[in-house]
Amino acid sequence: MDWFMKRSLQNGDRIAVQDGESGQGWTYAEMDVRASRIALFLRQQGVSLGDRVGLFAPNDVAYVDLLFACRKIGAIFVPFNWRLSVAELNGIITDCTPTCIFVHPALEETVSLLSLHGGTRVGLQDEAYQLALAEGESLADPVECHMSHAWMMIYTGGTTGKPKGVILSYESVLWNAVNTVISWNLTADEITPTYLPMFHTGGLNALSLPVLIAGGTVVIAKSFDAESVVKLLNQERCTIALMVPTMYHMLINSEAFEQSSFPTMHTFISGGAPCPQAVYEAFAHKKIAFKEGYGATESGPNNFVIDPKDSLRKSGSVGRPMMFTEVKLMRGLVEITEPHEVGEVVLYGKHLFQQYWKQPEATQEVLKNGWFYTGDLGKRDEEGFYYIVGRKKDMIITGGENVYPQEVEKLIESHPYVREAAVIGVPDTKWGEVIAAVVVLQPLGELTAEELKAYCSCRIAKYKIPKRFRFISELPKTAVGKCDKKALVALFLPQ
């Protein structure tokens, strides 16, 4: 089912995509014509059913163009994280062997260093491609694909080792979008900016595609700074936005944020990492809805919904399961039913991924009887609200006691002089692991390790208090705003 084509028939004259810098917009009808022309262009480049089509680009209309063009010929869209190293990108290209790779002018130098393994390279500004977009014929015979057919492949990476190609089918993408529209009450009046990178599921699937299936408008933002964010949100009359905690920290500490009432915005959403309480309070002060989300590339990514009126009362909660998502907590083979007990978050629904590309064993490790074992730890309160407490792999075992880093991080970040904190386990001969904290202070904050230990001592158990501290200017982050904890371990190892 080509739902974008159907949307173009129902709401053809509405703006589907708009460039946040130039202001140029394309209607649903125009975007569908572009997709049909590109689909024929792809076929002329030798792309056929099941072939991979890659894209190297900062946030751009090309993401939407190529995604829906691939739909029309049954190809698999592969957006590349261009922020990775040459070695990492070469590994991904070797893994997925794209038939055709599209390149934005800003990334031509990066791509020139890569081995494309016979894939045809097409510049987004190449004359032949631009001519096809402007005047080319449309595909006359789009492929009718089964809902289980692969539509996109997004590579995971960053903090979890070797990247894995996550295969999302038409069914996965459709159900994530529909589930989100229904559960989050999205309408055709939505206007959302894309500040997260569109090569990531957060930039493409979390909000952009749900807004498009609802008939709304996606405004493609290409850079982030607080002043321009506030200007764009107000100028384009945006209604809902998704960003990561780092972005929100920059936003709430800006003069532009203080001066704006965001008259058209009904909801701000944070994802990718836990959000500090200060961000909740900044939006509460303005009486603007703010909430956290949770997801993974493999799960659509959206899984939970929380009403804005509950988000401050249940600070830190990701909410309850969405309409068509089932959630349970597992400890080994045993399902946890008691409130506040920690277990692995396990998900079920038609929005889940199919498999990891060419990695059947890795797929079997996390997909069991249709349930996706996320590797994330969570708990549920008496009212059915879920809280994510960390990664299974990040759990610290010190002297036989389990410590969840997120609990300690949240406490440290509650200190008025602390901007951000990351807690890790460091190998230790006596304790197995000791807890270490890496702390970023507020611009005018002054704090010692002993003062932070004293702050923690009357608030959490003694065994949870970090034994080692490092104060640095910025935490290392992945492309999507998550703290790169692997990079922090080196701070505590013998030189």
Image (cartoon, rainbow, N blue to C red):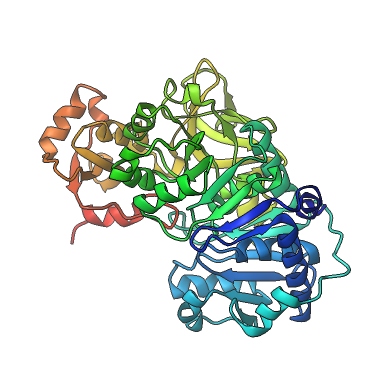
Between 90 and 233, the one lying in front of the other is 233
Rendering coords of residue 447 (x, y %) = 12, 39
Rendering coords of residue 99 (x, y %) = 69, 77
Numbered circles on residues, count? 0
Position above or below: 8 against 317: below
396 relative position to 492: left or right: right
Q: Residue at x 46, y 74 (%)?
A: 87
Q: Residue at x 58, y 27 (%)?
A: 334
Seen from this angle, which residue lies furthest top? 382
Between 393 and 307, the one lying in front of the other is 307
403 relative position to 456: left or right: right
Whether residue 473 is visible here, answered yes or no, is: yes
405 relative position to 307: left or right: left
Rendering coords of residue 98 (x, y %) = 65, 74
358 relative position to 80: left or right: right
Position above or below: 80 against 395: below
Whether residue 365 is visible here, answered yes or no, is: no
Placement of the C terminus among the 4 image quadrants: bottom left
Rendering coords of residue 38 (x, y %) = 73, 71
